[in-house]
Amino acid sequence: MLYILAGILGIYAVFTLTLFLVWIKNKPLPPAPAVNQPTITIIIPVRNEEKTLPKLLADLEQQTYSKAYFEVIVADDSSTDNTLSITQNLISQVSYPLRLLPLPNERTASPKKRAITASIAQATGDLIVTTDGDCRVGPRWLETIAMYYQQTGAKLISGPVTFTAEQTSSDFLQTVEGSSLIGAGACTMMLGVPTMCNGANLVYEKKVFSEVGGFSGVDHVASGDDELLMHKIARQHPNDIHFLKNSAAIVQTSPHRSFSAFYHQRKRWASKWRAYESYLPSVLAVFIFSANAAFLATPLLFFLGSLTGFQAFLLFLLKVAPEWLFLGQVLVFLQKRKAVGWILPTQFVYSLYVVFFGLAAQKKGFRWKDRELN
């Protein structure tokens, strides 16, 4: 058993150290003067976001990017609160083009994909930028995206996402966990084998969305408006998927304050794995599951007398030390230095969570925005 655990955690250590080296090697591109500013359509799918959406729209008012070059479409998915009326009132108050797109209250397998597709049909921008109604963005968000697009000509750009200011231990744990997803997704893009991205900060050409047929073929999956689309684009443009490693492009979103909301979000994320055509994300998910299961087995086997204290400590280091190096770097980039100290406490909680959701995801069904989906 010792050799099995050491083998799994040893491979995991090499994997994490590789991510660490890739991350520190990739430097942000230096600023470059704008030549031909691309036009941008920001799409915000919302449902019951009356408290958070106005803050995001206010952030967009502060953008350094010329308001002549971007527009905003709020796709309202039959909100039952005041989201619709609040947005309607703000149209005349903001200085950028703001459009409200009310969607019919009808059952669909993927409400978010429907909202994005309907919005793109009305979009005038060369670039589509998606985010969520509970997000916050900095003043140079669009400027940084446009600059990076001009420098790289990327077909799809994944931007950094983290959480708003932490208030509880749960918030810090979510920040550390989120940094691992952002960091791993970024590094696999840097290696040319993209696996993960986040629709809260995603950019792609409008024409490439049409070129790959939009969400056709994956529109039956409730989740995956980000990763499944990225994989479709990557198949046709394997060298044109990039991660925007620039702190000015960070998007902040709200952490979950209830276990129920967290549980259903993770089940929604897991639901898209069945639709992957590439084996790599699924293999990676199984590998991460196995490494965390091995980590949890270590103290159990120690208490049962199957491992010595020294052996258990070495196995512990194989997972914790590389993660400390990698996640520490990612958290500093995400401007979350206070969360670095939570990397160690997160280890056992995160491992329990990975194993739990890896098993829970095998059962279909979850709740999203007060709707039951599969």
Image (tube, rainbow, N blue to C red):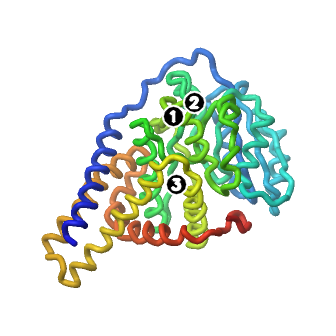
Point out residue 167 in the picture as x, y percentages from the top left corner. Answer: 50, 64
Q: In the figure, 91 relative to 31: above or below?
A: below
Q: Label 2 amino acid?
A: Lys
Point out residue 123 in the picture as x, y percentages from the top left corner. Answer: 76, 33
| Callout 2 touching callout 1 (CB < 8 Å) | yes
Q: Nearer the viewer, mark 3 or mark 2?
A: 2
Point out residue 25 in the picture as x, y percentages from the top left corner. Answer: 32, 34
Q: Give the residue drawn at x 55%, y 48%.
A: 277
Position of residue 237 in the picture relative to residue 341 (left or right): right
Q: In the figure, 2 relative to 229: above or below?
A: below
Q: Quadrant of the N terminus?
A: bottom left
The residue carrying mark 1 is 241
Whole-Å distance between the Cαs marked 3 and 2?
Answer: 26 Å
Q: Nearer the viewer, residue 299 or 361?
A: 361
Q: Earlier in the sequence, mark 3 or mark 2?
A: 2
Q: Nearer the viewer, residue 251 or 21?
A: 21
Q: Secondary structure at mark 1?
A: strand
Point out residue 358 in the picture as x, y percentages from the top left corner. Answer: 48, 67
- Neighbourhood count class around disc 3 (C-alpha, 10 Å): few under 14, some 14–19, many 20 upward: many
Q: Secondary structure at mark 2?
A: loop
Q: Nearer the viewer, residue 215 or 60?
A: 215
Q: Nearer the viewer, mark 3 or mark 1?
A: 1
The residue carrying mark 2 is 155
Q: Which mark is residue 163?
A: 3
Q: Label 1 amino acid?
A: Ile
